[in-house]
Each structure stands twice: as C-alpha cells, then as structure tokens.
Image (cartoon, grey):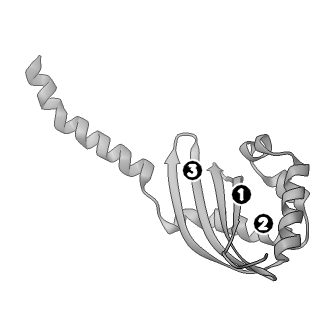
Amino acid sequence: MVMSQRANRPLQLLLFVALMISTVSCSRKDTGAAERGVDTFHAQYNREQYGEIYAEAGDEFRKAASEQDLANLLRAVRSKFGAVKSSKLEGWQVNHSPNGTVIILNYETQFEKGTAKEKFTWRETGDQTRLMRYDIKPQDGTAK
C-alpha cells in the first residue's frame, strides 16, 4: 500500500501543476471582451447613461449597490473630473474557474479635469461579460 502511494505522487504533482496552469494562466487575448466593455462604460459615462451601465452590470454589482447609488457615484465623479478624454490599459489579470472567468483591468484615465486610476472587474460566462466591480482613485494633485 505504501508503495502505491509513493508511485502516485508524480502523477498527483503533475495533475496539480496542470490544474494550476489552467486556472491561473492568462493571456492578453482573454481580455478583449472586457476591454470593449470598458470602452462602452466610458462612452455611457460620457453620455451620462448611468442606468444603462447598471442594467448591463452583473448580479454581483447590482447586489452591492442600487442603481441610484451608482448614479450618485458617477455624478460625483463627473462633477469632480468631467468627461473621459482618454484611457490607457496599465495591467490586467485573468483567472479561469468553473464559475467563469474573472478579468481585472487597471487603467490610467485622463478626464477633462484630472487623471484617475480605474479598476474594472468583469465576469465572463459563456458569451456574456458583465461588470462585477468598479473602483476609481484620483491621482495625487488632480481634480481637487
């Protein structure tokens, strides 16, 4: 019995490594739908279509905040920063799991009145990519 457990260790290690690679590996090609989602988010933000952003967000997002909460947040961002002028993807993370793929995109975004760091967290299941979370942090010295 001890002999068979030792013989299975290389196989167990190989399976563990294969599982880790499949759940942690990420590629820029995996971020395409989420990047398009950021473009849509910014366009809707610029048109003040906060209800559309909320309606297209995922269940996790809608459970965390009401439509009115999101509208209040984005109105405050718009008052402080103005419209989005441009944004630059600074980094990404992709995590695959049986519940779907979670994609985190970090942007530096130039608004009319300053610069901020934006973090978008998306869940991709099947052919749908939905916003799970949105965070924004002003750059030091901007949009005071």
Does 15 sit left or right of 46 as displayed? left
Tag 1 and tag 2, C-beta contact below 8 Å: yes
Q: Residues within 10 Å of mark 1 (few under 14, many from 20)?
A: some
Residue toward you, 71 or 58 = 71
Residue at image mark 3: 101
Where disc 2 sits, the SS reads: helix
Nearer to us: label 2 or label 3:
2
Residue 9 appears at what percent x and percent y?
A: 18, 33
Q: CA distance from mark 1 to mark 2?
A: 10 Å
Where disc 1 sits, the SS reads: strand
Sequence order check: which comes first, mark 2 or mark 3? 2
Q: Residue at x 43, y 52 (%)?
A: 24
- Give the quadrant of residue 80: bottom right
Sequence order check: which comes first, mark 3 or mark 1? 3
Q: The residue under label 1 is which amino acid type?
A: Tyr
Where disc 3 sits, the SS reads: strand
Q: CA distance from mark 3 to mark 1?
A: 17 Å
Q: The residue under label 3 is which amino acid type?
A: Thr
Q: CA distance from mark 2 to mark 3?
A: 19 Å
Task: Quarter of the image for the N terminus: give it.
Answer: top left
Compared to residue 44, the image places residue 13 above or below, namely: above
Residue 11 appears at what percent x and percent y?
A: 21, 37
Sequence order check: which comes first, mark 1 or mark 2? 2
Does 90 sit left or right of 43 as displayed? left
Compared to residue 143, the image places residue 17 above or below, namely: above
Residue at image mark 1: 134
Residue at image mark 2: 41
Nearer to us: label 1 or label 2:
1
